[in-house]
Image (spheres, rainbow, N blue to C red):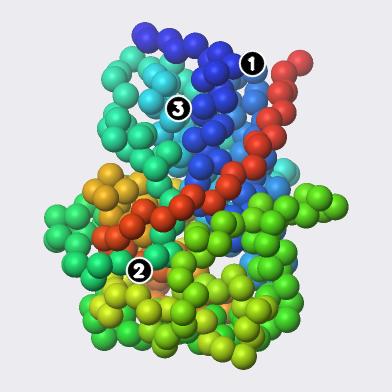
Amino acid sequence: MRTAVLDGTTLETLLSAAVAAPSIHNTQPWRFRLDLDTLTLEIRADTYRGLRHTDPTGRALHLSVGCAVLNLRIAVEHFGWTPVTRLLPRPDEPDLLATVRLADTTRPTTTHPALYDTVWRRHSSRLPFSGRPLPTPVLTELTEVAHTEGALLHHLPPARTDTVLRLTREAEYRNTTDPDRAAESRRWVTGPDTRTGTGLGMPPEALGPQDFLDHIPMRDFGAHLHPDRLPARPFEKRPTIAVLTTAHDRRTDWLRAGQALERVLLTATAHNVRASLLHQALEWPDLRERLVPPAGPRTCHPQMVLRLGYGPEGPATPRSGHALLLREET
């Protein structure tokens, strides 16, 4: 049996890997607790960082935490443990979304080193892509890694891509003309609020170009500056769009979808494929229903829309310091 050692430096790296995950509006809605007796890391929802107007059900929060769980699993394996993961392990503690126990292992780690390395390199790119299509083997691999985490990744044909972009455009228009949602978005991206502790801010270059043409509707975090214009930007004319779905739509499915999403994003990064997330239509129930791929299973719940392609890496958004609580069983 091979036993790894959990020292302070290793623990810090594990948590840094977890918080490198993407999250809606960069809210980073997670907290961590370490059970020293069982070497188990608890990942809890930081509900104060939830989005009351944009994400009233908490679905996007669960996806965000799922992404962090996947990063943590990969880092745990990298350091020589087997990650034993449980989702929603205690019904009487609804904020406890997952636990990852660091179990001793008798086998070599299965995570490819390149995938661990991509944890630190992955971030969304809202910049224009080249329009060069992704090779079929890459698309196939992205589909397969989503399936290993319990989700389906649907690569859309051109006609369906146009439909999904229209739905996203409609959702973005609704978001920018809804005062509560626009204010909520502004609160989280315009810089730290020293009074409330919210808002990590995003560097302007991370938001993409500001010249607006009616094509790919990227989320406009500066909508309050020009609410009279529909925020869409001149990107590639024929984007590669995929929709991530699950068979059910429960809290556990949202957490699995987050893990699938992050594995897709890390695998794409390993192939030097950039990605941005088009979440807007998922924030409106009537539009979300229309995202279901026609050729998909009868029961199919969209969880994320991805835009994939080749292009500049783009800048990273800031990460907050992670809060870690220690708990010893008595």
Instruction: Give the residue furthest to the right.
Output: 195
Q: Quadrant of the N terminus?
A: top left
Question: Residue 277 lies in what quarter of the image?
Answer: bottom left
Q: Position of residue 169 (x, y in %)?
A: 47, 84
Which amino acid type is marked by label 2?
Pro
Q: Nearer the viewer, residue 31 or 92?
A: 31
Classify mark 2: helix, strand or loop: loop
Residue in the picture at 72% in, 23% down: 327
Give the labeled residue for mark 2.
128
User: From the viewer's perspective, is residue 230 above or below residue 303?
Assistant: below
Q: Is residue 79 left or right of residue 40?
A: left
Q: Position of residue 281 (x, y in %)?
A: 50, 77
Give the labeled residue for mark 3.
76
Q: Nearer the viewer, residue 70 or 234?
A: 234
Residue in the picture at 33% in, 57% down: 312
Question: Residue 30 lies in what quarter of the image?
Answer: top right
Which amino acid type is marked by label 3?
Val
Label 3 to label 1: alpha-carbon separation: 17 Å
Closer to the observer: label 3 or label 1? 3
User: From the viewer's perspective, is residue 303 above or below residue 49?
Assistant: below
Question: Residue 188 lies in what quarter of the image?
Answer: bottom right
The residue carrying pointer 3 sits among few (fewer than 14), some (14 to 19) or many (20 or more) residues within 10 Å by Cα, namely many
User: What number is the disc on residue 37?
Assistant: 1
Q: Nearer the viewer, residue 91 or 201?
A: 201
